[in-house]
Amino acid sequence: MPELWPFRPLVGTSSERLEWLTDPLPGYTGEQRIALRDAPRQSFAYAFALDPQQYSRAKTFARRNGADEVLVPVWMEQTRNIGALSAADEVIAFDTAYADYRAGSAIVIWESDRKAVTATIDEIDGDGVTLTAPIGVDFTNPTVAPARQALLPDGIQTNRERGLTADIATRFQVLDNVDLSGAEIYDQFLALDVLTDPPAKVAALAESIVRATEYRDNGFGPIVAETQKAYADFGQTLGFRDEGKAGLWRRRQWLHNRWGQQKAFWLPSFSNDLVLQAGFGSGAVTLSVASIAPANFYFGRSVMIEMKSGARFFRTINSAVSAGANDTLTIASALGTAVTPADVRLFCLLAKVRLATDAVTINYRATSSTFRPNDTDLSTCTIPVTEVPA
């Protein structure tokens, strides 16, 4: 088994990068996207503050293993304080939910950077893991975490501005990558996720709408514009903020389900684009809204109607007719419930989008890699998306 990197990272310094490989093939009226990897490449970036003795051990570790595989704990998936273990134990009891433990892979049992061992997992269930052999060391109240095989492509980077303390940054490129795609976690509409979580403001959020166009200008005559696509490119930056191990796992699984740029999803505008002007019955397929555009704008667009009760409805607009300051929309099917304007919390347009990048970085702002037991697991990520033609 490869050698374990035994040091625990500083609070709020951990990040995880997932990199897919997609080949988008744009056309005038649409695009195709080809996924070129079965699983994303995963890497971890950690930062450490080491005393002189720890730093000496880290340097010799890097010299010995500069081009070799090592084992690195997945600290953001750890479980702390699992109770005493004896050297003869082959079964470790703890909650394995929301962590990527795998049969045949390694687990780390950690009490300090001087007292840590790795073992191979034989079986996994919701209440713990069974190992292929006894752990061989007594522990008082250790932490356990999955361990990944990885390389140190950048070695260790050190800054020694703080007296005897060595500030070290490392990046671990994981080798045993897997696809964690699972059941979809959001409401479905036309076989695609509807991202019903409003984006969080974890950084400046930007939007852009541009029509791909080639401009011909000889400098002294009129400028000629030739459109390259039959649709506008709508770009937006989404921010996500997730708390708790369940929330972190949910976000990671959702990202795996996207396969980078390959798989589209529905993104509500989370703005009251359409204002209902009158109530309608449970079997009605026409509804009156305040006009926001010419009638032909609505054709083929999809909408989300969110009720104050929490119920959500997703429908496609089949046609629209202008009626003065209002427009009458015909939707694909009735909602099955009577609705009044006072019942509606949000009536917005849906955009079909995909990730605009194959690389996503998740930052762990206050993970349980800290020694403070009351910290809440918290992750943030910012991801650009772009609209794709329906």
Image: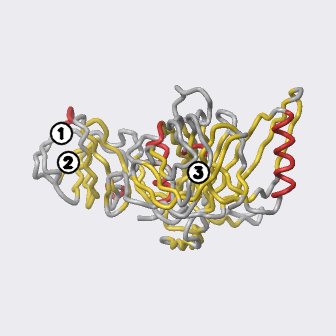
7 horizontally vs 269: left or right: right
| Real-space Cα separation, disc 3 to disc 1, in angstroms | 69 Å
161, above or below 127, in the image: above
Pointer 3 local density, CA inside 10 Å: few below 14, some 14–19, many at least 20: many
> What is the number of the mark on residue 278?
1
139 horizontally vs 52: left or right: left
> What is the number of the mark on residue 135?
3
What secondary structure is found at the residue carrying circle 2? strand
| Real-space Cα separation, disc 3 to disc 2, in angstroms | 67 Å
Q: Residue at x 31, y 42 (%)?
A: 347
The type of residue carrying mark 3 is Ile
74, above or below 34, in the image: above
Q: Earlier in the sequence, mark 3 or mark 1?
A: 3
What secondary structure is found at the residue carrying circle 3? loop
Indicate the quadrant where residue 75 lies. Answer: top right
Q: Earlier in the sequence, mark 1 or mark 2?
A: 1
